[in-house]
Amino acid sequence: MNKLPIRSLTLGLAVVVALAACGKKEEAPAPVVAPAPAPAPVETAPPAAPVVETASFAGLTLGNAVDENQNVTTPMTTFAPTDTIYAAVATKGAAPNAAIVARWTFGDDQLVDESSQSIAPTGDAVTTFHIAKADGWPVGTYKVTITLDGNPVATEEFDVK
């Protein structure tokens, strides 16, 4: 049996230990966690503009009588000299305040009457104006012009015969 010198044995043992060390798995380094990205800024819509409530013109009807809702009962454009003449102005929409003006003229824009009413409708509404003359209207052509908040919205001619 061969005897190996101690030195060879020590060297062999060192090789075995070195080989064993080479096969040893090292622990993986801890993963680097990147900081979370800053949240994107939340975009907020600008405040909505306040809704301006307005009444708008929906129609004009002339006649010589109105019902309990201020609607003209029988639309007409020719009247008798003794008639009371009504102008029913229909509006739609809501408004805290609106001004309606009725300007009545005869012939070549001779002023017969002008009156205004302030309304605060909450939806569809009818506002009625009228003219009457105890001794009767002169025969001829008349006109009523309606403005809503200062804007002309309707003009209608009618005759007295």
Image (cartoon, helix red, strand yellow):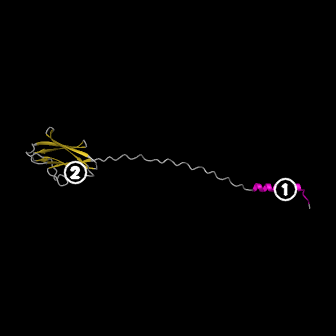
Q: Amino acid at mark 1?
A: Gly
Would you identify the image quadrant in which residue 107 lies? top left
* Residue 81 drawn at (x, y percent): 9, 46
Tell us which disc is closer to us: 1 or 2: 2
* Residue 41 drawn at (x, y percent): 49, 47
Q: Identify the residue under disc 1.
A: 12
Question: What is the secondary structure assignment of the residue under circle 1?
Answer: helix
Question: What is the secondary structure assignment of the residue under circle 2?
Answer: strand
Question: Does the segment drawn in magenta span residue 5?
Answer: yes
Q: Amino acid at mark 2?
A: Val
Residue at the far left in the pictured view: 135
Q: What mark, if any, has residue 139 been given in the picture?
A: none
Q: Are marks 1 and 2 in contact (CB under 8 Å)?
A: no
Q: CA distance from mark 1 to mark 2?
A: 116 Å
Question: Does the segment drawn in magenta span residue 152?
Answer: no
Would you identify the image quadrant in which residue 143 lies? top left
Give the quarter of the figure containing the N terminus: bottom right
Residue at the far bottom in the pictured view: 1
Query: Is the stretch drawn in magenta largely helix, strand or loop?
Result: helix
CA neighbours of label 1 inside 10 A, class few (<14), some (14 to 19), many (20+): few
Residue at the far top in the pictured view: 108
* Residue 46 drawn at (x, y percent): 41, 46
Range drawn in magenta: 2-23
Left/right of residue 83 with respect to residue 44 in the rendered view: left
Q: What mark, if any, has residue 126 been given in the picture?
A: 2
CA neighbours of label 2 inside 10 A, class few (<14), some (14 to 19), many (20+): some
**Which residue is drawn at the image coordinates 75% and 56% (left, top)?**
23
* Residue 3 drawn at (x, y percent): 91, 59
**Which residue is drawn at the image coordinates 23% and 46% (left, top)?**
118
**Which residue is drawn at the image coordinates 26% and 46% (left, top)?**
98
Sequence-wise, the earlier of marks 1 and 2 is 1
Give the quarter of the figure containing the C terminus: top left
